[in-house]
Amino acid sequence: MYDFHTHFIPEDVITWLRDHQQKVNAKWIKKTEDKNEFLVVNGKWGFELKQAFIDSQLFLQEQETVGVTHSVVSPIPQLFMYDFSLDITTDLSKVYNQALANLSHTYTDKISALGTVPLTSPDRAAQILNDAMQLGLKGVIIGPGLDGHMLSDDFFTPFFEEANRLEAIVFIHPLLCEDPRLKRRMMPNLIGVPWETTVCATDLLLSGLIDRFPKVKILFAHGGGFLPYQIGRLDKGYEQWELVSTNLQARPSEYLTRFWYDTVLWNKDSVNFLLKTVGEDRVVTGSDYPFDLCVWPPENIGQKGALALLK
């Protein structure tokens, strides 16, 4: 079984954070005795730094125990570093990508990896993407956009041009939603995370970007958010409004099957609906391991989607 949605932090990245902790405001905070330290960068999005994040042997052992034979490892979104200068984001991207490449070369049969890029500079991101794939990575993980820029904006064209040329996997993973209405009861995570995916995925679909860059392999986290469930509404809008249809060559529901989606949904009926809606070759098993809200053990749906995405 493939697990396409996992996260890991190599030792070289931890060393970089300690060496640059003043610049990126990195803090290790002990909240309770029964938990590991929490890592907080730049005052937000702290998370428990579990041993499985940093111990490759434990990571692989835990995956093997639940039947995962091959893990696709990604950097953690908390370390995208989009809030910082281009030099900092570029430096950490290079360190993270090299470390994950080393890990994947050490465990060739068990691990593939995606890198990270300085998305705030699409030209630099394109260069780092190229470097990452030269190292043997399968593509990159990115956030759903930047303040003031959706991923469909022309601003990101240099990045998507290179991703298209390289036929790279681009795994789009949200950060916590910062909508002020959600500042209670863990809603920034519970519904804010899939909402950020929904906004990004809907914008990419309606923009026609996949027609411009048909060889980019776009994978959406958390089952594509709410998009698959609301695709009928998009189809109706396509029939009704030129603003919806103008960039498209077919109905939105037909574009839905040109992306990939993971199974981080925590509900078998939801997974089955996704499989029925987009097809088995467009869905990959994912867990979000080892974050607190991981699907564990992951839902084994077969290998069609994984093999289609990795080919």
Image (cartoon, helix red, strand yellow):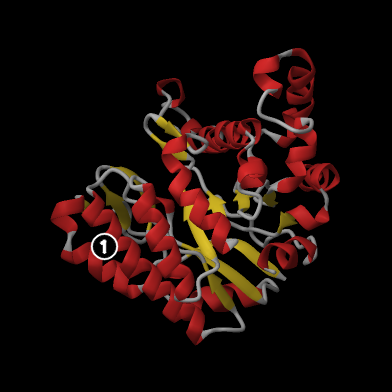
Relative vertical location of residue 213 with respect to residue 180 in this rendering, above or below: below
Q: Quadrant of residue 211?
A: top right
The residue located at (51%, 51%) in the rendering is: 161
Q: Which of the image's four quarters has the N terminus?
A: bottom right
Which of 3 and 298 lies nearest the eye of the viewer? 3
Could you classify mark 1 by the number of other residues whose Cα lies within 10 Å: few (under 14), some (14-19), or many (20 or more)?
few
Q: Which of the image's four quarters has the C terminus?
A: bottom right
Q: Is residue 211 left or right of residue 30?
A: right
The residue located at (38%, 74%) in the rendering is: 99
* Residue 233 on image: x %, y %: 75, 22
Relative vertical location of residue 9 with respect to residue 182 in this rendering, above or below: below
Question: Which residue occupies the extreme left position in the image?
Answer: 22
Which of 191 and 217 lies nearest the eye of the viewer? 217
- Looking at numbered disc 1 in the image, what kind of residue is underneath it? Asp
* Residue 227 on image: x %, y %: 68, 34
The residue located at (56%, 38%) in the rendering is: 197
- Say which residue label 1 marks: 91
* Residue 35 on image: x %, y %: 38, 59
Q: What element carries label 1?
A: helix
Q: In this view, does 134 lie to the left or right of 169?
A: left
The answer to whether one can see residue 291 in this image is: no
The residue located at (25%, 42%) in the rendering is: 43
Q: Is residue 239 left or right of residue 243?
A: right
* Residue 239 on image: x %, y %: 79, 18
Relative vertical location of residue 91 with respect to residue 137 in this rendering, above or below: above
Q: Is residue 152 left or right of residue 311?
A: left
